[in-house]
Amino acid sequence: MDVGWLAEGDDRSLCDRVVRALGSAIVREEVTPGGWFSTEAALGERFGVSRSVIREALKRLEGKGLVEAKPKRGIMVLPQDRWHLLDPEVASWRYRELREPRLLLELVGFREVIEPALAAAAALQAGENDVNQLRELAIAMREAGSRAAELITADRALHRTVARIAGNSLMYAAFTALEPGMAELRSVGSESRLRGPGHNEDHHLLVEAIANGQPEVARETMARIVHASRLQVMEFFDRSRLGSERSTSRDGTA
């Protein structure tokens, strides 16, 4: 693990950097569950920071369920079923450090359960201002065309707005906590060959179903949108895998 960039800054920023370095290392399984990092003193020397910085960083990682400090033994990495997966930092490390089909399809499965329900609820709750905002975002998606960054931004904002309008604070909190993964999911989707004009059209139909107070139509349309995301992820990684296999074959390596 390269830690040379940790040497500058105040204690707060140094702590943030240690937390990020250790958290990223854990999700990449540089230290497997049940394994040990080291003592506080050794970590302080390794990162070039004070023991107080290390202690604060470990407290934060313990609060996220990633590690458990064992006096005089070191810091043990906990199994994934102990991790707080809805913690925004944990979500960011998992989805940005590991661009894996398994993780993204797991996230699609979450969306398949929660987003159609949010869309149906939004159709019953939306006011005039909500509808105007959704229509502006649908137009922004359409006008983005092939400009992936603009399309992703508008798409993300539209889905977040639907979640907010639904009015269920627990579902909204779970949805927004996973936004780092949602962003990665949309990035992969934008690179899939399966994304076409129908993507924007379905979002337009979703907005109109919410505007017209049609919960079942909104539910079905959102389900179709999320299923398309599943297909896009599968196509992207299948194509990437085939490309890698062909490259390996051309190189003459196994």
Image (cartoon, helix red, strand yellow):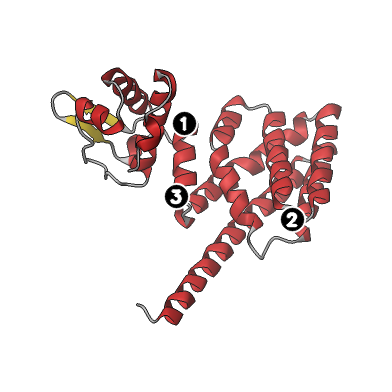
Q: Nearer the viewer, residue 101 or 123?
A: 101
| SS at mark 1 in the image | loop
Q: Quadrant of the C terminus?
A: bottom left
Residue occupied by mark 1: 87
Q: Quadrant of the N terminus?
A: top left
Crowding at dot 3, Cα within 10 Å, few <14 / some 14-19 / many 20+, comes out as: some
Q: Nearer the viewer, residue 74 or 195?
A: 74
Residue type, numbered disc 2: His
Residue occupied by mark 2: 199
* On screen, residue 5 above or below 236: above
Residue type, numbered disc 1: Asp
Horizontal side, residue 230 vs residue 195: left or right: left
| Mark 3 or 1: the one toward you | 3
Ranked by sequence position, the earlier of labels 3 and 1 is: 1
Label 3 to label 1: alpha-carbon separation: 16 Å
Crowding at dot 2, Cα within 10 Å, few <14 / some 14-19 / many 20+, comes out as: some
Residue occupied by mark 3: 98
Image location of residue 71, percent across then percent down: 16, 23
